[in-house]
């Protein structure tokens, strides 16, 4: 069952007619001509669609909050920042089928009453930004974008905003600051963006993969969609497999698939590379937890709070590898990406990086273990936004799972 990748390879991303021949933009036509905004929101709520940006927040419910706000000005933003290490699914979506995201964005903006929409794209995705710009220009020519979409009363203008490539700018409020021309730092919540977002107006931020599901939902109906995947996390998901598997790459699979199946089934990872023995997996990018072999029956859904699936990236590590290299690379990433707004994260990620550097070089000191535990607690419990906590997750698991391989 393919929703996100179903047209990949069959359409030319630079030619809108090629998407239209696959019944592209039919869902937009149906939405603006046959459905009022409330019915679109009801349909998305019924589908059970949950945000693919990591947290799995129910999409229709979020839209309803912004739709209820009386403001004449509202915004809708497609989050294509994607800076999580090992995650490149939104980049693929943008380059393989840009119109699917644009169509989803238009449907969402129409549903909440936003006349202005943005695609916020990571500055490192310059080629994908170009592909999206070409797609957008073609969609405008066909009257899918702009005022009076397809002769209806719906007006939605879309602009592309290129960020500078900071991980924190994927966090929705830092993203809003970035579009406003401010420092990319998160804002205090509440208020949440659907109530007070871009320029203080009601704003929806949705991940690009979330939006790419919408044409299917509107065209085939909520009921059809709700039957795919798991009951509480319906639909499919793009998973990215890395590391010591036979077939690393991207796979679209129903939500609810088990980690074991994703790693070992022939149609996905195909098992371990020859001669390699499974040690642990990391689900959800650099901010994800470490999964030992005894936990491979964990399913990948948004209800799994023990092992959150996050962005859907899965790294498989074999027994020949050195955990100290991973500890260093996690610490290196987070100390670089800490935005510096709050002390526990700014200092904590830096101190952890310093210790990680030494541990990797075999320079282990008496109080390292105690200091690391202290830093991890601080990151996990006191930082302003989730990035600080993310920096502690894999380290905390490694400390519990194999302390003897770290401090010796
Ligand atoms: C540090 C941090 C980085 C994030 N990066 C991204 C990102 O690159 N892309 C994304 O869609 N969401 C990211 N998020 C989640 C967003 O804040 C937000 O929840 C999401 O864009 C909402 O879209 P969704 O409801 O469709 O998932 C990040 C969150 C945090 C805390
Ligand atoms: S936790 Fe880190 S990224 Fe978040 S506000 Fe504090 S310094 Fe910035």
Image: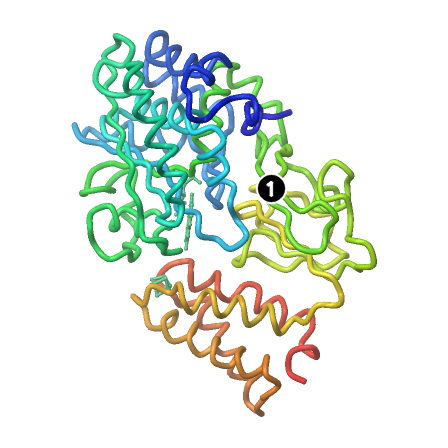
Q: Residue at x 35, y 36 (%)?
A: 130
Q: Residue reaching furthest right? A: 275
Image x and y of residue 121, in percent: 36, 43
Q: Residue at x 60, y 45 (%)?
A: 240
Closer to us: 82 or 226: 82
Badge 1 element? strand
Location of residue 145 (image quadrant): top left
Q: How many numbered marks appear?
A: 1
Which residue is identified by label 1? 239
Report the side of 48 relative to 264 (left or right).
Answer: left
User: With respect to residue 62, does 241 lie above or below?
Assistant: below
Image x and y of residue 208, in percent: 43, 36
Q: Residue at x 43, y 12 (%)?
A: 26
Report the side of 100 relative to 1 (left or right).
Answer: left
Q: Residues within 10 Å of mark 1 (few under 14, many from 20)?
A: many
Q: For disc 1, does the CB lie below 8 Å from ligand 1?
A: no
Closer to us: 64 or 258: 258
Q: Residue at x 18, y 31 (%)?
A: 73
Color scheme of the displayed model: rainbow
Image x and y of residue 304, in percent: 60, 46
Q: Residue reaching furthest bottom? A: 366
User: With respect to residue 247, does 119 lie above or below?
Assistant: above
Location of residue 142 (image quadrant): top left
In what quadrant of the picture does the N terminus appear? Answer: top right
User: With respect to residue 18, does 57 lie above or below?
Assistant: below
Location of residue 151 (image quadrant): top left
Image x and y of residue 95, in percent: 46, 34
In what quadrant of the picture does the C terminus appear? Answer: bottom right
């Amino acid at each position: 069952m393919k929703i996100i990748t179903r047209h990949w390879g069959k359409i030319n991303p630079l030619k809108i007619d090629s998407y239209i021949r696959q019944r592209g933009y039919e869902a937009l036509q149906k939405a603006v001509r046959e459905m009022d905004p409330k019915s679109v929101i009801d349909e998305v709520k019924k589908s059970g669609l949950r945000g693919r940006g990591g947290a799995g927040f129910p999409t229709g419910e979020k839209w309803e909050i912004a739709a209820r706000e009386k403001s004449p000005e509202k915004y809708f933003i497609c989050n294509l920042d994607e800076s999580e290490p090992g995650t490149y699914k939104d980049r693929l979506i943008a380059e393989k089928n840009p119109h699917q995201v644009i169509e989803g964005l238009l449907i969402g903006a129409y549903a909440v009453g936003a006349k202005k929409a943005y695609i916020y794209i990571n500055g490192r995705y310059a080629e994908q930004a170009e592909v999206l710009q070409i797609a957008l220009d073609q969609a405008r020519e066909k009257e899918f974008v702009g005022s009076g979409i397809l002769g209806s009363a719906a007006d939605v203008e879309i602009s592309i905003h290129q960020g500078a490539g900071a991980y924190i700018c994927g966090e929705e409020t830092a993203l809003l600051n970035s579009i406003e021309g401010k420092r990319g730092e998160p804002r205090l919540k509440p208020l949440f963006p659907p109530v007070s977002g871009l320029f203080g107006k009601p704003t929806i931020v949705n991940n690009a993969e979330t939006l790419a599901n919408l044409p299917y939902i509107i065209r085939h109906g909520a009921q059809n969609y709700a039957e795919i995947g798991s009951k509480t996390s319906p639909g499919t998901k793009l998973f990215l497999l890395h590391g010591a598997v036979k077939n690393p790459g991207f796979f679209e699979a129903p939500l609810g698939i088990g980690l074991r199946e994703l790693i070992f089934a022939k149609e996905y990872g195909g098992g371990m590379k020859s001669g390699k023995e499974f040690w642990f997996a990391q689900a959800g990018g650099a901010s994800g937890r470490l999964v030992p072999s005894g936990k491979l029956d964990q399913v990948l859904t948004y209800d799994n709070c023990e092992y959150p699936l996050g962005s859907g990236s899965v790294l498989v590590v074999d027994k020949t590898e050195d955990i100290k290299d991973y500890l260093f690379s996690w610490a290196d990433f987070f100390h670089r990406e800490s935005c510096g707004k709050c002390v526990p994260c700014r200092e904590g990620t830096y101190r952890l990086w310093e210790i990680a550097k030494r541990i990797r070089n075999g320079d282990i000191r008496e109080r390292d273990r105690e200091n690391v535990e202290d830093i991890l607690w601080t990151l996990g419990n006191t930082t302003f936004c989730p990035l600080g906590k993310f920096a502690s997750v894999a380290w905390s698991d490694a400390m519990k799972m194999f302390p003897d391989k770290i401090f010796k």
